[in-house]
Amino acid sequence: MLIFAMTRFVRHALGAALLVLLAACASTDKPKPEAFEANPARLAIKEAWRVNVGATALPLELRVVGDQLWVASSQGDLVALNASSGAVTSRSGAGATLSAGVGADKEFVAVVTRENQVITLREQKELWRQKLPSLVLTPPLVAGARVFVLAADRTVYAFDALNGRKLWSQQRPGDALLLGQPSVLMAVGDTLVVAQGGRLLGLNPQNGSSRWDTVIANGRGVNEVERLADLVSGVSRVGDSVCLRAFQYAVGCVDARTGRLQWTKLASGATGVGGNADLVVGAESDGKVIAWRRSDGDKLWTHEKLRFRGLTGASLAGDSVALGDSEGNVHFLSPADGSLLQRMSVDGSPIVSAPVWVGSTWVVLTQRGNVIGLRP
């Protein structure tokens, strides 16, 4: 069984995909985190609700649709929650172990199974499923009565959401080694924005034709691993400005209307970024949290007290930056200077994806399958 919380790569050989795991070193010399600084409790926040949806062995992402939140367990249970109250508004199931999910709009819900089947449901009933030739780790995008899927081999597919008919597919030849974690697939206006390696593409969602193609990072190094620069899930969008991370290489911002690269800065993280109109925030692989000015990428502050704690991607909303860690803590930092505002322990198991802000509530998902609403 694959442990999806670990870093994974997909290698192509003789037309088949071979999954290669880069296991974490078991060395006793692994850096240990410092003891926590005292919790200043400068932000008043409390647990508002908690719902268990089933264990989550891989980082399935929370999907926000209006005031509704979709979440899936690894075993294929699909649950919709009211983000204000935590009340369950819908339960359904894919009937299979999942590799990616959830994609949803107000009508359709889509996930992908470990057997590479795209499954789309409406009103808790399965509409169709389509078998793909390769692994999928990025949540599907449901938009405009279509289901878009980005496979690990960088092929983009578009399906009719109602009947599953394949409308088009587009594949870009790439490096032999691909990052095996969720990547970027989103809509900005009438443009489908998708990652392919270290490049960000703007596609016409009607036919898959390219509107623009922008290089965020070119891998450099003596071997395939060192040259890996795939774009990772966790994007900060403000209007047409899309800011994101290239794995272990850079953070940068792109104008998604024109494809113009606004700036890039060297950065060594592996998780996504959050942000607002003024700044972009992300965690480096060693746990340093860095804020960059959104307009030009200048570094604004660095928080070093969370190093080696296995941080999730960062999210920024209201008056705080939120990150989870591998011990089940949620940390809230000040956007102004990065200082600690509050720290909360939820259930002791790892937070498996970046916290999300819905309405007036922070929502986190733990490995034990607890979806927890935290309200300032």
Image (cartoon, rainbow, N blue to C red):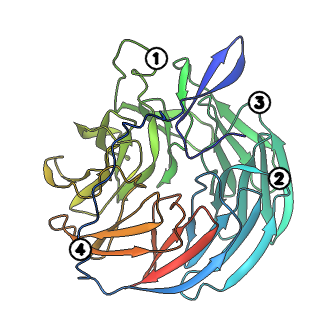
Image-quadrant location for residue 68: bottom right
Cα–Cα gap, marks 2 and 1: 33 Å
Is 146 located above or below residue 2 in the figure?
Answer: below
Q: Nearer the viewer, mark 3 or mark 4?
A: 4
- Amino acid marked by disc 3: Pro
Q: Nearer the viewer, mark 2 or mark 3?
A: 2
Task: Say if mark 1 contacts mark 3, CB within 8 Å.
Answer: no
Task: Say if mark 3 contacts mark 4, CB within 8 Å.
Answer: no
- The residue that label 1 is drawn on is 224
Q: Secondary structure at mark 4?
A: loop
- Report the side of 35 relative to 28 (left or right): left
> Which disc is residue 96 wearing?
2
**Which label's residue is closer to the chain start, 4 or 1?**
4
Density class for disc 2 (Cα within 10 Å; few <14, some 14-19, many ≥20) is: some
**Which label's residue is closer to the chain start, 3 or 4?**
4
**Which label's residue is closer to the chain start, 2 or 3?**
2
- The residue that label 4 is drawn on is 38
**Which label's residue is closer to the chain start, 1 or 3?**
3
Q: Nearer the viewer, mark 4 or mark 2?
A: 4
Q: Nearer the viewer, mark 1 or mark 3?
A: 1
Is 14 located above or below residue 240 in the figure?
Answer: above
- Amino acid marked by disc 1: Glu
Cα–Cα gap, marks 4 and 1: 42 Å
- The residue that label 3 is drawn on is 133
Q: The N terminus lies in which quarter of the figure?
A: top right
